[in-house]
Image: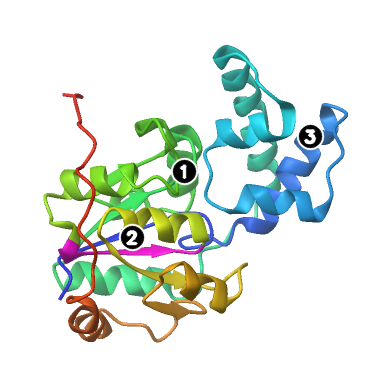
Amino acid sequence: MFKSVIFDMDGVIIDSHPAHREAWRTFLQSLNRTVSDAELDFVLDGRKRAEILRHFLGELPDEQIQELGNRKDDFFRKAALQLRVVPGVVEFVSGLRSAGISMGLATSASESRTRHTLENLQLLDKFAVILTGDDVALGKPDPSIYSLACKRLNVAPQSALAIEDAVSGIKAAKGAGVTCIAVAGHQPPHRLRAAGAAQVVTNFVGFSPAQLELLHVNNSDRVPSPRAPERDDRS
């Protein structure tokens, strides 16, 4: 059985992708930047906010990136007033807690948006470790956030399971030596499997912690060696 489960947030814990699309579209329009639906796919692949801003707006100083990022998050809060959790995730989280499996969150979202979102959904206290895009220098698909999550949870990568919904997140987990399952919310299952997902689910309805034991056995002999975890100098 896995000792820890590490969740991504957007598309895994919360069904937030429509709100993200609307927030980024409206925010960019406020800057006289019109983008197509295809271009907006870029914001749904688990990238850090600063990377997305530079993708659409070019190279900007860090101070301006921070200010623009805060403005974008304001648009997201307005678009996400009716945000809902992914079906079955609350029951799945409760089952993990009852089974004594520790849980972490590893998201590319900013710390302020992450905590605001989890507080509104009454999920903030469910995770022993919460890591955001503010905690690592490089966003997904770099594996740093998963290496750091395992370190904070005090668990070997081979004993952890990641749950992601984007190709970049799956690659980040696999790069850290963590088995990953995927939620097929906005990307087709074949793309998620091709990225390295050990299993793909539509949501968490009917998915129980007991099923993780079989998944662990089936994948224990083919989990790659992890990259050395990023040094954590914070006290």
Left or right: where does residue 29 sit relative to residue 175?
right
Q: Quadrant of the C terminus?
A: top left
Q: Is residue 69 above or below residue 120?
A: above
Identify which amino acid the numbered label 1 is placed on.
Ser
Left or right: where does residue 211 sit relative to residue 134?
left
What kind of secondary structure does the magenta stretch mostly adopt? strand
Q: Which residue is mark 3?
A: 28
Which residue is located at x 23 percent, y 48 percent? 227
- Mark 3 and mark 1: span between their CA atoms? 20 Å
Over which residues does the magenta segment extend? 158-165
- Among numbered discs 1 and 2, the one appearing first in the sequence: 1
Left or right: where does residue 226 sit relative to residue 135?
left
Q: Is residue 112 above or below residue 174?
A: above
- Specify few, some or many for label 2: CA neighbours under 10 Å numbering under 14, 14-19, or 20 or more: many
Q: Which residue is mark 2?
A: 174
* Residue 116 x %, y %: 48, 40
Per the image, label 1 sits on a secondary structure element best described as loop
| Circle 2/circle 3 CB separation < 8 Å | no
- Mark 1 and mark 2: span between their CA atoms? 16 Å
